Image: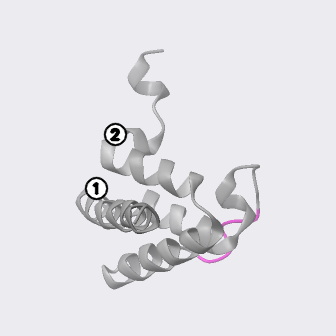
Amino acid sequence: MSKENKQRWYDKDPVVQLCIGLLEKSDNAVRDHASDYIIERSKNSGYVLAVNNYEYFWQRWQDQNIKHFLAIEYLKLIDDETKHEICTEVVQYIQGLGKEENK
């Protein structure tokens, strides 16, 4: 199996990969805010998740909160360009929070 086949869905774009990593390390308040944004932007772009397709839970960080879970599912669903744009904005938001804390 080639290395390309072992990549996670978000490893294709370094910005998306950074976004997921930052979300994973963030506290729940930051995740909540970012998740609301991801879900809203995705819906405004015309994407809709199928209802009741998510009756399983793994032991990943996003599985502990339905809002975080749905935000990640939306990121999986949306087109690459929109995903990149949303993730860029989420990264800027999270990194901006870090700069505010260091003031």
Between the residue at mark 1 and the residue at mark 2, the CA separation in whole angstroms equals 9 Å
Q: Label 1, secondary structure: give it.
A: helix
Query: Residue 12 got which mark?
Result: 2
Is 93 located above or below residue 4 in the figure? Answer: below
Residue 23: give x, y in percent of width and height: 52, 57
Residue range highlighted in magenta:
51-55
Q: Is residue 23 left or right of residue 96?
A: right
Sequence-wise, the earlier of marks 1 and 2 is 2
Q: Position of residue 98 (x, y in %)?
A: 43, 61
SS type, badge 2: helix
Query: Residue 7 at what x, y percent from top left?
Result: 45, 31
- Identify which residue is drawn at 43% across, 61% down: 102
Magenta stretch holds residue 79: no
Q: Residue furthest top?
A: 1
Residue under the point 62% across and 74% down: 67
Furthest residue toward front: 103
Seen at 40% across and 47% down, the residue is 18
Residue 98, numbered label: none
Q: Which residue is mark 1?
A: 80
The amino acid on which the numbered mark 1 sits, given as a three-letter code, is Asp
Q: Is residue 53 magenta?
A: yes
Quadrant housing residue 82: bottom left
Residue type (three-letter) at the residue carrying disc 2: Lys
Q: In x, y percent, where is residue 62?
A: 65, 59
Q: Main secondary structure of the magenta part?
A: loop
Looking at the rendered image, the quarter that the C terminus falls into is bottom left
Image vertical order of residue 84 relative to residue 42, above or below: above
1 and 2 marks in contact (CB < 8 Å): yes
Crowding near the residue tagged with mark 1, few <14, some 14–19, many ≥20 C-alpha atoms within 10 Å: some
